[in-house]
Image (spheres, rainbow, N blue to C red):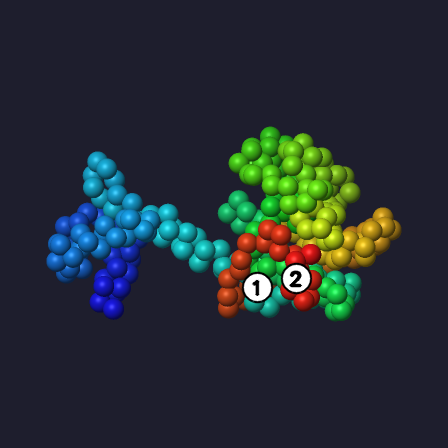
Amino acid sequence: MQALIRALRILREVGQANAGVNLQEISDRLDIPLASAYRMLSTLLDEGFLVRSPTTKRYFAGPRALTLSNRAVRTRHLYQVPPGALARAAMATGETVFLTEYVEHTAMCVAIASGRRHLRLSAQLGGELPWHAAAAARVLLTDRADAEIRELLSRTTLEPFTARTPTEPEQVLASIHQVRLRGFDTCEDELDDGVSTISIPIRYSSGRYSLTLAAPTQRLRTASVRQTTARALMTAARELQAELARSPKTPPSTGGRPLQNSIRNSSGADR
């Protein structure tokens, strides 16, 4: 237990030091013998929680420590209880509706309201949606220049989740151009077979969001149904925009998991 407490104290000390710390400073500040401090620093270094400058020999937070820190920051974006407009949209349509936010260069699912149908789909709270294969992610980019979108996609693996997944940057750009013209995007069997979504962008002063309805593809097959659903979502988006402006987020109780290939039916089986 003492070793664990010392390791945590070392991580806290390193995290608070913008210029890093060296072995002697750790030993003096935390009252740890030099030999013990060296062993603990070496272990934290080997495990990726610390990195050490080869020139100054000073220790800094490593990639694993930064991952934990970033995850804690990101969970602040999640809603434990979905906004009222989101819940009303799910009730009115009978389908699952979720909110996606642009968070640290990712498209994160931050709120979910489940539908009332017997066969319904769900998403993973806190999960990240791929830019190329999810309408909820693509509509977040509609106000970005094409060159900026291409640069973002160049840093992304355009994985073919299904036979219908767009795997070329120009295909993704074509979808974004359509969003700019008609105000919404659709995704049919691109991330999961048998799953379709309709997404509406939401402009908000402190962030970028998308409102998305997910349903089995057969229920969104016709153009008339998609148009009707899109209009209902646009109404909900306006209500949600006003709600976001006046209501703070409720702190989450838990985090989430990656959302790739994770839109599921109500029994939990992959679709």
Residue 199 - label = none
Mark 2 Cα-neighbour bin, 10 Å: few <14, some 14–19, many ≥20: few
- Residue for point 26% across, 43% down: 52
* Residue 228, quarter of the rendered image: bottom right
Mark 1 Cα-neighbour bin, 10 Å: few <14, some 14–19, many ≥20: many
**What percent of the width, then of the height, locates residue 164?**
72, 42
* Helix, strand or loop under label 2: loop
- Residue for point 85% across, 50% down: 222
* Helix, strand or loop under label 1: loop
Q: Is residue 126 left or right of residue 173?
A: left
Q: Can you identify the residue that label 1 sits on?
A: 79
- Point out the image quarter for the C terminus: bottom right
Callouts 2 and 1 close, C-beta under 8 Å: no
Would you place residue 241 above or below residue 53 in this image? below
Q: Is residue 39 left or right of residue 113?
A: left
Q: Earlier in the sequence, mark 2 or mark 1?
A: 1
- Residue type beneath disc 1: Tyr
**What percent of the width, then of the height, locates residue 187?**
72, 47
Q: 238 and 93: which one is in front? A: 93
- Residue for point 29% across, 45% down: 51
Of badges 2 and 1, the one in the foreground is: 2
Q: Is residue 97 left or right of residue 232?
A: left
- Residue for point 71% across, 51% down: 193
- Point out the image quarter for the N terminus: bottom left
Q: Can you identify the residue that label 2 sits on?
A: 269
